Amino acid sequence: MNVRVLVVEDERDLADLITEALKKEMFTVDVCYDGEEGMYMALNEPFDVVILDIMLPVHDGWEILKSMRESGVNTPVLMLTALSDVEYRVKGLNMGADDYLPKPFDLRELIARVRALIRRKSESKSTKLVCGDLILDTATKKAYRGSKEIDLTKKEYQILEYLVMNKNRVVTKEELQEHLWSFDDEVFSDVLRSHIKNLRKKVDKGFKKKIIHTVRGIGYVARDE
């Protein structure tokens, strides 16, 4: 499982230390050094955990957390701050933060807390993913449209599951490659195109409302709107 973590921290030395520690755990890490970029990334990119400092330039951590929750982004958030007073911890948790780590901290504790958030997220996930009348059972790896089961290969199911997990958001070809493949671009493009063609036949053929759409030159999107 590829775990993607966003680090939003304006202290560059600390941000780099956190990033290095996370990468040693084989996590994929994106790092932002200010609240503006951090806000954009948190709202527009899929992450498994966000590590969010409070005292940031442009937009502080409170603003980013508030915008995430108001936009329906439920990614687990671990807040970092030198503000160790209980009132700040309570404020963060009441606003939707999932955990709180005061500075200074041991990187081993940070990693342990990140892993705990990932486990909690995994355990709380429903086994059903829904996009219109398309239903995916993530426990059995089966897909249904209406009352009919769709016969999918393992890779077709993985692609469809990722698109539905990110429904109504355009998933780039590069993102699919990063999450589901590990070979070169030329081979990948041809293989992905073939899989999408097969998925369209299996998922959308015979239905007036199409779920899988191509965004030319960018990628694909599963739509239920």
Image (cartoon, rainbow, N blue to C red):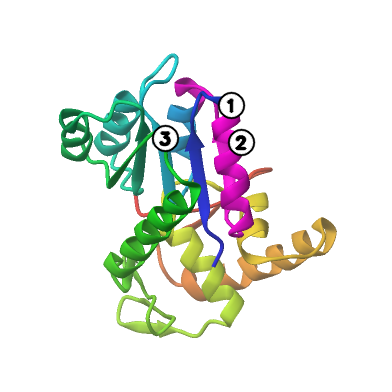
Q: Is residue 195 magenta?
A: no
In terms of depth relative to the viewer, which is nearer, 105 or 87?
A: 105
Instruction: Looking at this view, name the residue that lies furthest to the top.
Output: 58
Q: Position of residue 200 (x, y in %)?
A: 55, 67
Residue depicted at 45% across the width and 22% down the height = 35
Label 2 Cα crowd, 10 Å radius (few <14 / some 14-19 / many 20+): some
Judge from the rendering whether residue 108 lies leftward or rightward of residue 12; answer left or right.
Answer: left
Helix, strand or loop at label 2? It is helix
Q: Position of residue 163 (x, y in %)?
A: 49, 59
In terms of depth relative to the viewer, which is nearer, 91 or 192?
A: 91
Label 1 Cα crowd, 10 Å radius (few <14 / some 14-19 / many 20+): few
Q: CA distance from mark 2 to mark 1?
A: 6 Å
Secondary structure mainly formed by the magenta segment: helix
Judge from the rendering whether residue 70 lies leftward or rightward of residue 58; answer left or right.
Answer: left
Task: Tell us which disc is closer to us: 3 or 1.
Answer: 3
Q: Quadrant of the N terminus?
A: bottom right
Q: Is residue 30 magenta?
A: yes
Q: Amino acid at mark 1?
A: Arg
Is residue 22 in view from this perspective? yes
Which residue range is magenta in the image? 13-37
Q: Which residue is mark 3?
A: 104
- Earlier in the chain: of badge 3 and badge 1, it is 1
Q: Which residue is mark 2?
A: 16
Q: CA distance from mark 3 to mark 2?
A: 15 Å
- Earlier in the chain: of badge 3 and badge 2, it is 2
Assess whether mark 1 and mark 2 are in contact (beta carbons under 8 angstroms).
yes
Q: Which residue is mark 1?
A: 12
Residue 81 lies in quadrant: top left
Q: CA distance from mark 3 to mark 1?
A: 15 Å
In terms of depth relative to the viewer, which is nearer, 119 or 216?
A: 119
